[in-house]
Amino acid sequence: MIFEESDTMDDKIRELLKTLPKIDEVLLVLEKDDAFEGVSRDIVVEKCRQIVGEMRKDILGSKKRGEKVSVPCSAVKAAREVRKRLLALHDYSLRRVVNATGIILHTNLGRAPLCGEALKRIIDVSEGYSNLEFNLDKGKRGIRYDHVKEILCCVSGAEDAIIVNNNAAAVLLALNALSEGKEAIVSRGELIEIGGAFRIPEVMEKSGAILREVGTTNRTHFSDYENAVCGDTGLILKVHTSNFKVLGFTDEIGLDELVELGKKKNIPVMNDLGSGCFVPLDKYGFEREPTVQEVLKTGVDVVTFSGDKLLGGPQAGIILGKKRILDKIKENPLNRALRIDKLTLAALEATMMHYLDLDRAVDDVRVLRSLTEPVAGVKKRADELLSILEGLSLKDMTFSIVEEYSMAGGGSLPTQKIPTVVVAVSSHSISPNRLERELRKLEVPIIARICEDKVIFDLRTITEEEFVFMKDGMELIAGVS
């Protein structure tokens, strides 16, 4: 369609709007190409309407953008876009990726990979029916938490356990059950924010608890807590600042002191541990991280933490503590809204079995293995991958071994640098940014990072089983570059 210079923008837009295809015309083109296979007619019709609607918006929007309008629409053009989107519906959006970043608990990449036993239990439990809420011994309705309560209490030393869908839910539920309409005392230096805009003050507000800040950002004294306790106090809350450290002129009160204050004033004390570690990581060269067992030994009433961080299990919020306190939390109506499903229970139970022997857990839980693996083991895998990639003889690509640092990620161990070994990739024909993008487009995407103008693969988060994805991916990228 050709327009004269004398034509106004409005005239051009009106003419182009007339070229918009009818839905039946687009459907006719699609029927000739057998585009309906595997998709209902209703879905195809809706996609046609969506595409034609977008074409109309694009034409009308061009006037606002001050753009020239010259490309007419057609049924063939619309059908081409509909066909592309119909094909995309058959592609899984949630996919496996190779984590080559060296960030072990990468929140954007799903945090903790599950152990083999957890995967098997998920399949076994989900292929048919299960005794999710059925007591096989008594032949009547049971409680879903009972499937993991015993093992959690056995490993941690807690009296009782509740599991909800993540730690934010665990904190929300506990605060609502114990301090709704009452003050919850917390140090100003512990009013943290973690990824996804999870802020302690906002969660407290939604829970119905009234925030009572004490102390300052860097220093909070015992007297600050003691002076804040009053008839309106419902809870004393201590939050583990797992994703940052305050250094220098600082002071904070230990949990054991707060527990004593809680006993004296008859006020429950809660500790949000965040990551929740069962293994003493200082044995492996890390800074001291309080374990769940140590925290519970202080006599604290409630402890909450995540299942998919340092525990290495599925996403879950785990609540441990005194039975009389947890009974009150269980009775809260929010508990049902936040409860976990059978797949999470199956994976969590299988993961916790490894913790019956802590040394075994370090070997069998991938997160712990990745954290504690000696550099020599990482270097061995790096050499193996280097040999594989160099053996491909890829044009214009060079590979080298570089010493680097990994991170725990996921708001865990924030100041800890973990020595690692990476394979660095450089190319004369592909820029680092382009190579990083191409790696993300692979059938099994490889998520890497760029350092000093090179793409690097951190072997601390890559297993030998994933080398085949690295090999095939690099071959494909080199072949199309």
Image (tube, rainbow, N blue to C red):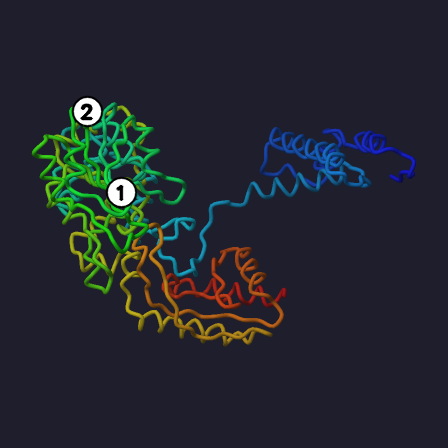
Along the viewing direction, whichever of 178 and 24 lies nearer the viewer = 178
Q: Between tags 2 and 1, which lies in front?
A: 1
> Which amino acid type is marked by label 2?
Asp
Instruction: Say what amino acid the circle numbered 1 marks.
Output: Thr
Who is closer to the viewer here, 175 or 118? 175
Q: Residues within 10 Å of mark 2 (few under 14, many from 20)?
A: few
Q: Residue 288 occupies which quadrant of the picture? A: bottom left
Q: Is residue 19 above or below residue 414?
A: above
What percent of the width, then of the height, locates residue 13?
81, 32
Helix, strand or loop under label 1: loop
Label drawn at residue 216: 1
State the image coordinates of residue 220 (x, y, percent, origin top left). 21, 43
Mark 2 highlights which residue? 232
Residue 370 x/y as whole percent: 31, 61
Report the front residue among 183 and 275.
Answer: 183
Label 2 secondary element:
loop
Label 2 or label 1, whichever comes before in sequence order: 1
* Residue drawn at 45 percent across, 65 percent down: 457
